[in-house]
Every structure is written in C-alpha cells, then in structure tokens.
Amino acid sequence: MILFVLGLVVFAAVVSVAVFFANHPGQVQIVWQGWLVETSFGVLVAAAIAAALVGWLLVWAVGLILGSPRVLLRRRRERRRRAGYRALTQGMVAVAAGDPQEARRHARRADALLADPPLTLLLSAQTAQLEGDEAAAKKFFTAMLERPETEFLGLRGLLNQAMRAGDQSTALRLSERAMTLRPNTPWVVESRFELEAQEGKWQAAGETLAQAAKHRIIPRGRARHHRGVILYELSRAAVANGNGRRGLDLAAQARGLVPDLAAPAVHYARLLLDHQRCGQAAKAIERAWRTAPRPELAQIYGTMHAGEAPIERLKCFERLARQNPGARESHIALAATALDAQLWGEVRRHLEQALAAPAPPLMVAKDGTSPKASPLPAGFRRENGLAGPTPRLCLLMARLEEAEHGLGEAMRNWLDRAVNAMPDPRYSCTSCGGESLEWESRCPHCGRFDTLLWRTPAWAAGRAALPAPAHDAALPVRELAAREPAND
C-alpha cells in the first residue's frame, strides 16, 4: 500500500514537471566549435536524463564483466563450505555411532573442503580415539591448544587422556590451565578438586571446594561433607607436623561436618586423650555413636576404660549404647563387654537382639549390581539391611558357648556357621566397588575422594544367612544352634 501511494506521488510529480515545461518551453542555444544547437529547455533536460541512463548502463555492464570471476569464486567457496559442514556433521554422527571408518572418511573430506582447520581438529581427534590411536588423538588435541577458539576443547581432550592414563600431575596442570580460561565451568572445577584431593593437596582442594560451593557447582550437602573430610586430613597433617593445638581445632570442626563418619570422631577423641581431656573424649565418642555406630568407636571407647573392672566397663558401654539403642553395633558391643564380665544371660540377650536387628543397608542397582558413582547414584536403590548372623556374631556366640559350656557341639556349630554367614559390614567405594576394613578419605583401590561408605556388601543379598526361615532370627540363640545340624 505504501509503495502504491509513493508511486502515485512520483507519477504526479513527473506529470506536473512535464506540464510545466510544456507551458513554458523556453529556448536554449549552445554554441560549441562553430556548431549552433537550438532547442527547448524540456528537450535538453530529457536528453540529459537519457544520457545519464545510458552512461549508468555502460558502467554496470563493465562492472558485471569485470566482477564475474570474483562472484563465481565466491559461489564456489560457498558450495565447498556447505559441503564441508555437511561432511563435518556426518563425521560427528559417525563418531557417535561408533563407526571409525566412516568417521575417518568424513573427517578427511571435511578437512579438504573447509579452509579452517580448527573446525576439523576435534573430529579428527575423536576419530583417532575411536580407532584406539591415543597418540594421534593427543597430537590433534595439542594442535587445538594453539588456537584460541579451540584451546578449551583441546584442554578437555588432553585432560581426559591424562586422567585415563593415571597421570595425575599432568591432569592437574591441564585443569589449572582450563580453569584459567573458564573458571566457573562445572567439569573443570570438579576435575581440579578431585585431582587436588587425590594428590593430597588439601589446602588447595579446600579453596577449590569453596569456589565450587559458592557458585553452586557442587551441591551444598556434598560440599559440606567434602569440607569435613578435608579438615580431618588437615588436622592429621597438623598433628604430624607437631602442631597439636591446630590439629585439635581442625578435628573439632571436621567432626561436626561429617557426623556419618567414625574416623574423624576417633581422631578427635585421641587428640583429646593426648591433652588429658578424657571426659570430653568420652562425650565425643558417645555423640558420634548416635549417627555412626562403628566398631572403631567401640574399640577406642573400650581402650579408654581398659583399666576398669568388667562390671564398670559394662556400665560405661551401656551408657554408650543408650545413644543408639536400636543399632546392631550397640548390642554387639554390649555382648562383648558382658562376655568379659561373665554375664552369660546378658550376652545371650544382646546377641539375640543383634541377630534380629538389621545390618547397615545395601545399596544395589536395579539390575542387582553395586553402585559406582556416588553415595546413592541415579538408577540405584537403597535396600533394607539383612537380619541374621555374621561372622562376628557367630564367633561371639562360639566364645560364649566355650566359656559357659566348654568345647562341644554348639561351639563347633557356630564356628562352622561363621564360614558361610552373611558378611559383616565394611567400607565400600561407590566409585569402583572396592572394599576396605578401614575408612580412608581416598579409596585404597581407585584413589577417589570421599567415596567410602559403611554398608553391607551388595553381594550379601545373594547369600542365605540361615538355612532356617527368616523368622528364626528372633528365636533364642541357643535354640538356633540346636536346630542347625553340624557340618561333617
């Protein structure tokens, strides 16, 4: 509509000018080199416009002729660019599909068609990795470091290679460089933190963790737990360097951040004992028992009361057990202490309760395998712990039968049962599945940081704890022993 109105305005203006010149023709005389040209003013204007149009057409034609090679070359480059990007895309799809030959063919075609090598370096590196040629992949990733637009991608490729090869020093150096480029990228921060922790650089790991928590890269709860473990390691380092006061302060902070771990509480209690603060050490163990009843806590608690009479020691352990009366470890600790006091009825009562109490929960995948990535990764479920005798319970019962009745059939039955009993809980790594009898901040098998959990092994679910029905676990211990036939 606007163009139509504009056309009407232009047409009206042209008609008006033509009418004006028709009514006022005027005369124009041009004398040049003996030539005399006489005409009206309107004709002169029309001739000038016609000459200008002819000149513009000539200039356009000459420009078209001279510029056609450049236009053809640009169109050819555009076709090659489109074909190169198509080959690049198809190569990425081939990498995702796991077809190294197809990926290599498209990588070569993309490299030949595209005049920008950084676009094809990543495809070439991934293709080399798909073919198992890590040396070629490293060459391509290293070449990517020389260009600002691909430096970060090259760092990630080299970092992954170094981590797979176990070259932690190189991986840490690469992660520091990547963090300089993009300090708030989640995988960069997490990789650097994990590497610093695996290398035992606790101060640096704490600083990286603080940055990750500030930017919410690591969830708040997990960051708090990691910080507690780091403070525990810093406390151990301070004590090793002779700074006991600082070690004690750090241990107190660590104990409050990781209530689910026994080792920091044990460490804190030992430092308190070194400073002759026995009452505070006992309270620290009792407080930790509420959330983390573990054998190591019972062991140090027993050491603290080693010089007391058996009955007095039993009273102390009763105070400890009251902090978590339903825990299996509470009944086991009371049974062992009552055994030393020769209170056979108390021993049996607590062993019966220990048999009926569930062990620490199992965490298994939906397909029955062990978890591999975190305390409770996606796709895994927490199963209730199994009730029934474990080797520790069977051995305690064998000691009881020997102490009360001497060597006999019942004692041998419990010793035989200990061989095939459901395993005792232990520390298991949620990353590699490795097991350990002692907790450490780093898995002794794969080196991952803060991945050990106290739990019943997942494979225990496939073993029969008792040949009798499950409800027999509630029967008196002596009756259980009598019902089980002896092994020949």
Image (cartoon, rainbow, N blue to C red):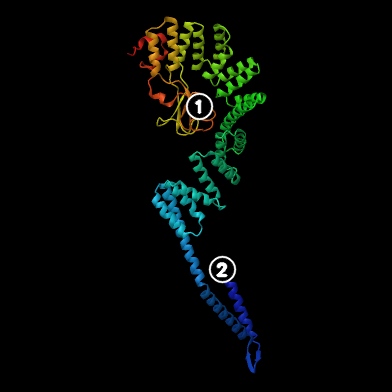
Residue projecting furthest to the left: 488
Query: Is disc 1 surrounded by few (<14), some (14 to 19) or many (20+) residues within 10 Å?
Result: many
Residue type (three-letter) at the residue carrying disc 1: Leu
State the separation of the CA atoms marked 2 and 1: 77 Å
Q: Tag 2, which secondary structure?
A: helix
Relative to 343, residue 181 above or below: below
Looking at the image, the residue that sits furthest to the front is 241
156 to 395, vertically: above or below: below
Mark sitting on residue 331: none
Select label 2 or label 1 by which is in front. 1
Task: Determine the residue positioned at 40% across, 24% down.
Answer: 461
Location of residue 284 (image quadrant) = top right
Determine if residue 390 is in view.
Answer: no
Circle 1 sits in a helix, a strand or a loop, which is it?
strand
According to the picture, the residue beneath numbered tag 2 turns out to be 3
For badge 2, the amino acid type reads: Leu
For the C terminus, which image quadrant?
Answer: top left
What is the number of the mark on residue 453?
1
